[in-house]
Amino acid sequence: MTQDHASYWRNMKAQAISGEFKIEDDLGQAIADVVTQYIEALEVQKSNASGLARLNGWGELPSAIAIQQKLEGKATADESAAKRLEAHIAIARDQRDTFLAAIGKLQAVDQQTAGDLGATGAGI
């Protein structure tokens, strides 16, 4: 289902970039602002989920260790909460970009994203 949503929003973004999809400036900006807040909230949740990668205090019993490992995996493994949140963040970014493109402001977002990526890379 997430893939279907991702494809849908990538298609809508392409339509907005090509000029097939347009909306009023104020409406597009308002929607983009709300989606930006949503992205920020999802990023906080992803950070919280990633923080659960290493749990402690479960004791030494084999069953406790098994439960601990299972819960750690749910937080950060291949089909984990963190990975699912990342997929939702990507879709939300496409949504934001779609509405900004529909009002002709996508270039400013691309420059902001490039700056954010540069800052993130510098911190690594």
Image (cartoon, grey):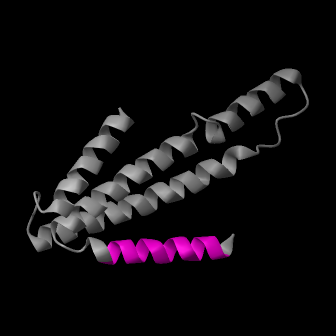
Residue 103: % across, % down: 16, 70
Whether 103 is drawn above or below 91: the answer is below
Q: Quadrant of residue 100?
A: bottom left
For the N terminus, the quadrant is: top left
Name the residue located 65 percent from the left edge and 76 percent from the top edge: 122
For the C terminus, the quadrant is: bottom right
Taking the view exactly as shown, the residue that stands out farthest to the right is 60
SS majority, magenta:
helix
Q: Which residues are magenta?
A: 108-122
Left or right for 40, reference 119? left
Q: Quadrant of residue 99?
A: bottom left
Q: Quadrant of residue 56?
A: top right
50 or 111: nearer the eye?
Answer: 111
Residue 118 belongs to the span the image colors magenta: yes
Name the residue located 29 percent from the left edge and 61 percent from the top edge: 96
Name the residue located 52 percent from the left edge and 59 percent from the top edge: 44
